[in-house]
Image (spheres, coloured by chain):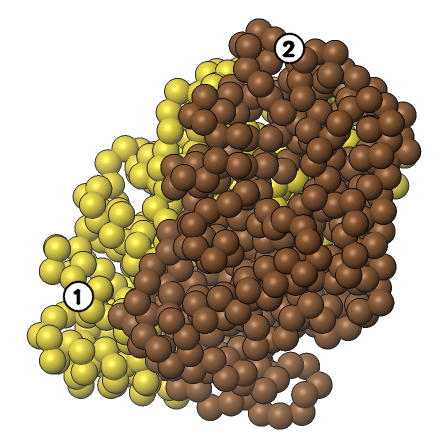
Chain colours: A brown, B yellow
Amino acid sequence: MTTSAETPFALVDRAKVERNVARLRDHLGGLGVALRPHVKTTKALEPTSMAFGGGTGPITVSTLAEAEFFAGAGYTDILYAVGIAPGKLDRVARLRQRGVDLTILLDTVTQAEAVVAFATEHDVPLPALIEIDSDGHRGGVRADDPQLLEIAGVLAEGGVEVRGVMTHAGESYFAYTPEALRAAAEGERRAIVDAATRLRDGGHPAPVVSVGSTPTAHAATDLSGVTEVRAGNYVFFDLVMAGIGVCTVEDIALSVAATVIGRGPDESLLTDAGWTATSSDRGTSVQPVDQHLGIVTTDEGVVIEDLVMVGASQEHGVLAVRPGAGRGLPDLAVGTRVRILPIHACATAAQHDHYEVMLGEGEPVTERWERAHGW
Amino acid sequence: MTTSAETPFALVDRAKVERNVARLRDHLGGLGVALRPHVKTTKALEPTSMAFGGGTGPITVSTLAEAEFFAGAGYTDILYAVGIAPGKLDRVARLRQRGVDLTILLDTVTQAEAVVAFATEHDVPLPALIEIDSDGHRGGVRADDPQLLEIAGVLAEGGVEVRGVMTHAGESYFAYTPEALRAAAEGERRAIVDAATRLRDGGHPAPVVSVGSTPTAHAATDLSGVTEVRAGNYVFFDLVMAGIGVCTVEDIALSVAATVIGRGPDESLLTDAGWTATSSDRGTSVQPVDQHLGIVTTDEGVVIEDLVMVGASQEHGVLAVRPGAGRGLPDLAVGTRVRILPIHACATAAQHDHYEVMLGEGEPVTERWERAHGW
């Protein structure tokens, strides 16, 4: 990599992004379902467009700021996949008035009532998905919960479109074998199809049946009844995903470029990439192999055996040999550039306002991708 | 608090900032040393100016982006307190050419040689402090390490001003009694004065003797031999500082405003403030009382007994009753606003590009303070 950018910065390998997005596109194409990428990981236009082979397509967002950013670039089919706070309906309505088919998400009667009240008062359509809890991970109602039909009833009676159901199999991040991942994908599919069936039996068309997580999107072998898949992390991948076997370390397209600035305590090296650059996500601490705050590579992207980022303060990273590895600290002089592979790409990327992008390993940095930020 | 801002956002109580900055200013004034606040916590002009009672003064920065941001607002005496990466000297020189007396930091002969080479080639003064390791926490050379005089020798022979010594007593964050904090402050003072004495005995004037950390700055009762104190966190304070007794929970001037958006698993509530809003810092996990990802207050700033933020994903916070507290989940309806008090104010603030500022509790939000960002 050659670039005049000063460390620390977020570095993206465009060729790896191209390969990662092609892999999931091909996989889902073979299963006959649509892809609605979650842009919360990259928050950037270029890799999102690459996910569609150029052009635009249906996307998922985690903030209304993302929705506005992508709407400004011509995206018109957007799912805001965080339970709606009633105070945000104003902004949702403004996006719809701009011509964006923005779908909202909810899982309580209270939200349904607030949505109906707003839609009625302002005479604006607010199509909604109901969030389904497929694995006890976070929000949503269970497919067999009486509230499902109650929520749908409130919406439909109030003239709000019950567009369908959505779930996120968050527990798949803790599945460590191909069998467990396939089981998570099948559990996610079964729960969401059950929920859609109950809605339809209750008289609601519910055309959208949406599932998604990077692990289940790749592990699914049958998506009968599902209409769309959401995944976001897969564009970059990270060490959590490598740890559960969804990708290899070589697939990781994002890293943080850093410079060695000195020696730290207890046989360690200091870099200029602290948690402001890498995040302090410790997602692999619950996995069989703990990668601490990230694996270290050379400036050419070659993994430096057993060197990990073991600590961070605001603008300092601490690199040391993996505990028990039984080797000495590599000889990296002050001024040497290294890269830190992310534990959790969403968290690492969130620390940056843009990416420096190289065409591929050994190629210069020639692009800069801006990220949506804030809420 | 009344504001039209949508959650999540970073909320600052101006009256508490005023009180916090006055407290340290008075304390250090009584000890007869200068204050060089570290702006890495707030990264904002307004609270920094408040620390000087209005106007400007000497500051400490953690990035050159901060240096440039504050230089643009008239700050001319700036210490860049992260070990210099040789590749950044260009930008340091540009700041000095703008009239900023920017001091750099180093702790290796390699850096000293790079600084001398750059200063000679570009004919620019690059006054430097040598970082001293006072407690084995991070970087720096020990006061009795022969490298101290070696580094100073390389600088002086190369025509670079050895401006003095600096240390950061990072281990004071793990001191839990007034006695331990005073001991940390005295240990920091003694180490830095020893180092300055050795430099002066070696023929280097070393006029600057700089110490600092929020805990030691408040705990110090004697700063003989010290010329300046750095502290940054004290402007906002946080739960880590409350945990070690440097402040009370009521002193914390920063919080994250959030909205309840639903129910989560296992008797929990979901909010719209995930780790993008609060950070995932778990700094109190090693303290006697674990505050998880933060204490929860009402929208009026009243602590909700035993309610803590126990989990976070990118845009979801999970609130639950403190394990073992033996009470039920409070009845907070969807749409209710709450606030999360930060575990680590530097980390929480770093997730935001600005602060919404109320004059005081019960007052409306009337100011917006922008933060420096990036590197």
Report helix, strand or loop for mark 2: helix
The CA span between labels 1 and 2 is 60 Å
Judge left or right: residue A127 versus residue B102: right
Amino acid type at circle 2 is Ala
Residue at x 64%, y 36% (from the top left corner): A82
Instruction: Please tell me whether residue A76 is drawn above or below residue B244 in the rendered image.
Output: above
Report helix, strand or loop for mark 1: helix
Badge 1: how crowded within 10 Å, few (<14), some, or many (20+)? many
> Which residue is tagged 2?
A117
Residue at x 39%, y 41% (from the top left corner): A73
Between B357 and A373, the residue placed more toward the observer is: A373
> Which residue is tagged 1?
B93
Between A34 and B224, the residue placed more toward the observer is: A34
Between A23 and A94, the residue placed more toward the observer is: A23
Residue at x 61%, y 41% (from the top left corner): B315
All told, the count of numbered labels is 2
Judge left or right: residue B283 versus residue B223: right
Amino acid type at circle 1 is Ala
Q: Looking at the picture, how far across and down is residue A268, in whole percent? A: 53, 80
